[in-house]
Image: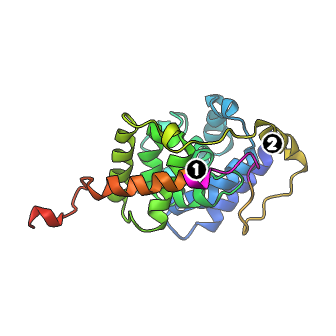
């Protein structure tokens, strides 16, 4: 089932119908976890640009135009890379990787939060710190707790956290646990037997291990301290006397 185009096409059609009356950007948070769930890929498979090229150029170019189209007729896509391009730019690969990097084990809830913020998708996701699962969850916790509120806040918090990683070894400060590769393999193998996506219910990803809570909380507290002194474009600081 995971290699059949039909279910993916149905999912994308459903997305366009559901979000027909709102800005297409709002569909990212809904689509990302469901695309990840239905494709069931390993990271190695997701690194194959041929898959994403097929989705963008053959299976669903209409979706790419719907999501990224501009101009008078709303069908002019300014970047060819949205059809076939770098992993963090291509229409579908960016959503799959966002789901992979921000999911907390089988819980896709953090993915919805991450993909609801275009600054995370467009800028933060490319930063090296996001490869460390507790760091990714810590950044989202700052947003969930409204420590960071705007896109500029998110970019500033991620920038200082990423810079701090040059001198702090996150794995030592907030260790992660190895993900269960066998659980992932079983989840992928069960694709043909998995229940169909319930569009109104968030699906569950592979049970390959949650992010250690203590590690995520340690980095959340550290990031909050870093953000307190971070320069944010357009933000007036009290100590500036303005």
Does the segment drawn in magenta span residue 95? no
Query: Viewed as shown, does residue 73 lie left or right of 83?
Result: left
| Range of magenta residues | 205-214
**Label 1 crowding class (10 Å Cα cut-off): few <14, some 14-19, many 20+?**
many
Q: Quadrant of residue 53?
A: top right
Residue sitting at the far right? 193
Q: Which SS type dominates the magenta stretch?
A: loop
Query: Viewed as shown, does residue 15 lie left or right of 127?
Result: right
Chain-order first, disc 2 or disc 1 = 1
Task: Quickly name the residue at label 2.
Answer: 183
**Label 2 crowding class (10 Å Cα cut-off): few <14, some 14-19, many 20+?**
some
Q: Residue at x 63, y 61 (%)?
A: 109
Tell whether label 1 touches label 2 (CB within 8 Å).
Answer: no
Q: Quadrant of residue 46?
A: top right
Residue 10 in the image: state x and y as whole percent.
Answer: 75, 55
Residue sitting at the far left? 241
Q: Secondary structure at mark 1?
A: helix
Q: Residue at x 76, y 48 (%)?
A: 206
Q: Quadrant of residue 151?
A: bottom left
Quadrant of the frame with the N terminus: top right
Residue 52 in the image: state x and y as whole percent.
Answer: 63, 36
Query: Viewed as shown, does residue 59 lie left or right of 237?
Result: right
Query: Viewed as shown, does residue 139 lie left or right of 175?
Result: left
Task: Quickly name the residue at label 1.
Answer: 102
Q: Secondary structure at mark 2?
A: helix
Q: Is residue 89 visible?
A: no
Residue 215 in the image: state x and y as whole percent.
Answer: 55, 50
Does the segment drawn in magenta span residue 206? yes
Q: Of 47 and 164, which appears nearest the observer?
A: 164
Residue 97 in the image: state x and y as whole percent.
Answer: 59, 43
Q: Residue at x 22, y 62 (%)?
A: 235
Q: Residue at x 46, y 58 (%)?
A: 117
């Amino acid at each position: 089932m995971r290699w059949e185009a039909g279910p993916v096409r149905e999912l994308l059609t459903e997305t366009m119908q559901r979000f027909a009356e709102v800005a297409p950007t709002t569909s990212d948070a809904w689509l990302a976890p469901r695309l990840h769930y239905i494709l069931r890929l390993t990271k190695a498979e997701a690194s194959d640009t041929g898959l994403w090229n097929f989705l963008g150029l053959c299976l669903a170019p209409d979706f790419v135009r719907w999501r990224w189209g501009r101009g008078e007729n709303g069908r002019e896509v300014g970047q060819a890379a949205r059809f076939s391009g770098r992993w963090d730019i291509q229409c579908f690969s960016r959503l799959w990787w966002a789901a992979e990097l921000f999911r907390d084990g089988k819980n896709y809830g953090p993915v919805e939060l991450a993909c609801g913020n275009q600054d995370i998708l467009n800028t933060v996701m490319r930063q090296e710190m996001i490869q460390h699962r507790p760091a990714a969850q810590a950044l989202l916790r700052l947003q969930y707790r409204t420590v960071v509120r705007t896109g500029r806040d998110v970019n500033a918090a991620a920038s200082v956290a990423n810079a701090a990683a040059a001198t702090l070894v996150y794995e030592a400060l907030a260790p992660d646990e190895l993900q269960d590769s066998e659980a992932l393999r079983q989840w992928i193998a069960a694709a043909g037997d998995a229940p169909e996506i319930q569009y109104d219910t968030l699906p569950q990803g592979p049970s390959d291990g949650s992010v250690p809570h203590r590690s995520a909380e340690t980095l959340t507290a550290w990031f909050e301290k870093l953000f307190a002194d971070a320069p944010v474009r357009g933000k007036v600081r009290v100590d500036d006397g303005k």
